[in-house]
Amino acid sequence: MTYLGFIREHLLTWIVFLPVVGMAVVLFLPKEKAGLIRWTSAFFTLLSFLASLELCWAFDRSEAGLQFVEKMAWIPTFNIHYYVGCDGLSITMILLTTLLSFLCIFASWSIKEGVKGYFLMFLLLEAGMLGVFVSLDFFLFYVFWELMLLPMYFLIGIWGGPKKEYAAIKFFLYTLFGSVLMLVVMLAFYFYSEPHTFDLLELARPQILKIKDLNIFGIALTIVEFRRVLFILLFIGFAIKVPIFPFHTWLPLAHVEAPTPVSVILAGVLLKMGAYGLLRISFPILPQETYWFSYALALLGLVNIIYGAFCAMAQITLPQDRGGNDWKKLIAYSSINHMGYVLLGMAVFTTEGINGAVFQMFNHGLTTAMLFLLVGVVYDRVHHRKLDGFGGLGVQVPIYTGLVALASFASLGLPGLSSFISEALVFLGSFKVYPSITILATLGIVINAAFFLWALQKIFLGPLNAQYKNLAEVNFRELFTLVPLSVLILFFGVYPMPVLNLMKATLDRLLTLLQAA
Amino acid sequence: MESLSLNLALYSPEIILSITLGFVLIVQMISQSRLFTFLTALVGLMVSAGATLAIKSFSPQFFFANQLSHDPFSLFFKLFFIIATFFTFLFSYRSYEIDEERGAEFYLLTLAVTIGMCTLVASINLLTLYLSLELVSIVSYALAGFRKEHPASNEAAIKYLLYGAFASGTMLWGLSLLYGFTGSLNIYSINATLSTASLNPLALYSMVLMVLFGFGFKITSVPFHMWAPDVYHGAPTPTAAFFTVAPKAAGFAIFIRFFYSVFANNSGLPDQWITLPHVDWAFLMAILSAVTMTLGNLSALWQKNAKRMLAYSSIAHAGYMLMGFIVLSKEGLVSILFYLVVYFFMNFGAFFVVGLLANKTKNEDISGFKGLGWTSPLVAFSMAVFLFSLTGIPPFAGFIGKVYLFSALVQKEIYWLLVVAILNTVISLYYYTYIVREMFLVKPVNSDKALVLSPLHVFTLILLVIPTFIFGLYWEPLFKYVSNSLQFIVIP
């Protein structure tokens, strides 16, 4: 029992580093044994997932602060700590990450080339993502944040589609640009705090940041302005990851070119990191600036909602040579739309809004992941994703059709499915504060419904395309990845309390902090 | 006479290097064996490194009639040069650019440069300083032209010679003006006179600029960098790797010692300096730093030859390191020293991989990297580590080096330079990943074979990769060591 006790005491460390252990094991497997490599990776991601379930089980839902905290000195001369912990905000993201990573291992069965390298990178990616969600030291956070970029670059660049090289470098350049801005803010926080610290909780205490007036080449910045500049720099860093409107151009490209499991991770987990970063770092440390920026944030959310929806719609109306007619791109743009709801919910500082926003992050992870998996299923069989290249598949592959319909309905926010709850919460929260923006944002829902239904119609209804008379139904392995997600979507659509309970206490406290500002 | 033996003891690393230099020749003549010569050189370096560590116990002092200074700062750099030379020798072993029978010559010349550098970093007298700088320079010209049959190598040598002669001539003029104005050759006395006597600011400024010419040439700062790409490109790859690391570090060392002792004074606060009145060279260097990194990175973007690309990248890195130079604080200088150490591993490593590949393809074109990740994963993986580290991405050492440089700027609130630096980081990612792309994203042609590596090469590669990792994850001991090494101002 002492072993179990040891594991429990360092549960978060285990969750983060089990994939790394998996990497070490895979590294020593011969590269010809593809099956062994796959199952080993599956085993270690499963362990990590089980550990996160244990975390969820032991998690005290009434506690708003951090739990499972581990703190060790790492670099004493620079006051950097290995400092991890989890609260209601991060636990949902940890669960999402471990679940999706585990399922994606099975969606990676179709990778045939460079199997060993692929799984090494995939495990590293998982460790990086989990590390971001548990870090409470800004430096540690930054290291994990950047650590993700490397495997992602290789995963898109090596195993991606036709324009993979361009997509990979664009993703890398954009996100690195965002990160270095974050690095500047990180160092500024460190040197302006008394005593110097990277500890995110310490930094969030009022009066700890002693920011002074600044004069750069005759441009005088007062304390207030300088703090706002810091907020904006940090915001851009996170906005690129979300992505928020003018910084979004890497996303459609990266999502479309990446292999299916990587698209799932990109949409399911990576996009959440931007919003998570805002909630974990920007909001608590710079609350007044957050308040100052909130209207702009709501507007940006609105732009994301409308712009993303129209871009997705364009996939149906535009021909292929003008960049349209791609099912995967449609889903990618719908992600931009969905992240808009998250932003809107975060910007209003109401209980409903912020709970809706975080729940929407979680739900978007489930539904979009499922949609990408489903596109992958058909792509593996027919090797194209043209929306008008199918037709009538409903007769041929009924189970598949049912699953796609479920995921699409969930994504467009049909009552009874999980996204409905979160979107409704967001709108409830935001209507009180910005009624006009909320009304315009509901327009996004309508367009959302339009393009998802239109896409369903084009692919599954009408006469069966003769080419696909022998199209095979989803197989057991694919069902194994899809069914858990569908069950969760249905379950949380009816009874969302398990997730909402997890995060409520923490978000309430964050809200009090913001309302005080 | 006890003081003579003490002086000799303090000078022992250089003396051992000189003896090694002689032994290399003798062993080569007697044994005619490349292996023995090689081993002699390595053993000599190890003994010299041991001596450097051993004399650490002597208290800091001046020796040889106040010509040289024995302090942690010079010891740090001596050790640095000896290790760099050691790796250069490992690198040169079986390199296609160093002829079998001319191995001894190569060791001899490189060791002579090392002796020069070791003396240079310790000198506190203008005469010694100039002489040792010339020893470094003149032997370097010969090293650059080592591939006699190769036109690019000849071009490199002659270019290096012309530029170098001009640079050291200008610097010598500056030094003689300094002597003329102050009547002293000792840098501390010069400083004392400069800070009390009121000199014509114009005269002072011109002296600073002239001296800067000489040092700027060594560290390849813009606008004194023109020679660097051609020389690094033309010189044999092991030498190029050596040039981008060791003489550059020597340049930085003496640059720091000279400018912080002569043209700056302690500001009254511990570990903070101020420039002499009317001569704001810190601001001037800040501009040079911004220009150097930008120009280096932008030029590197267009290169199709890996060696040339790394040459430009090494110019950019000089620009990064200058950021630590302009903040006039101990933190800034420590960050330079720290960066030099990690820069050594990653830059040397990148050159090493280019050299390994060139042994097979006989040129250094980036297209030669195609599919390397699939044919020789170990080499390609190491190269990727070095390149990402050069970009400054965690968890590699280059990132930590950059963090320290950046934090020195943040501390002094020099944000404009910081913005330039982070934009440069993003630009540099593009060309570093270009090689990564060729290695991994491009599939090999069927005829491509794996690189054949000798165990020594694998060993060297691992010796370079591991620190690049370790110092990215746990750098506390290195930082402490570097921090303690920064004691060079000994009041006479």
Image: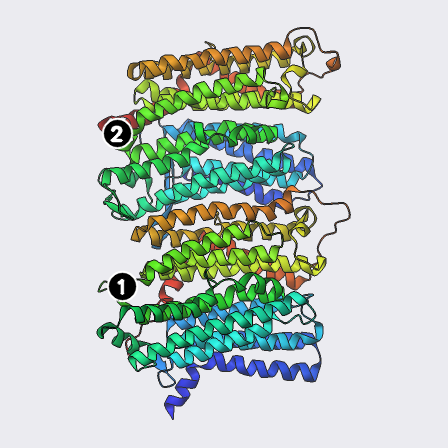
Q: Label 1: how many residues lie within 10 Å, few (<14), some (14-19) or many (20+)?
A: some
Q: Which mark is residue A104?
A: none
- Please name the amino acid that badge 2 sits on: Leu
Q: Which mark is residue B274?
A: 1
Any part of residue B469 in sight: yes
| Horizontal and vertical percent position of residue B358 | 67, 59
Name which residue lies at 52% across and 77% down.
Answer: B47
Q: Chain of mark 2?
A: A
Question: Quadrant of residue A433 in the image?
Answer: top left
- Asked whether A472 or A246 is in front, the reply is A246
In the depicted structure, whether residue A361 falls above or below residue B34:
above
- Asked whether A126 or B250 is in front, the reply is B250
**Callouts 1 and 2 in the same chain:** no
What's the CA distance linking mark 1 and mark 2? Answer: 44 Å
In the depicted structure, whether residue B11 falls above or below residue B455:
below
Pair 1/2: label in front: 1
Q: Which mark is residue A513?
A: 2
Secondary structure of residue under mark 1: strand
Q: Chain of mark 1?
A: B
- Asked whether A304 or B485 is in front, the reply is A304
**Left or right of A110 in this view: A440:** left
Name which residue lies at 30% across and 33% down.
Answer: A284
- State the residue lying farthest toward the right: B447
**Left or right of A377 in this view: B252:** left
- Please name the amino acid that badge 1 sits on: Ile
| Horizontal and vertical percent position of residue A419 | 45, 16
Name which residue lies at 53% across and 67% down.
Answer: B84
Q: Label 2: how many residues lie within 10 Å, few (<14), some (14-19) or many (20+)?
A: some
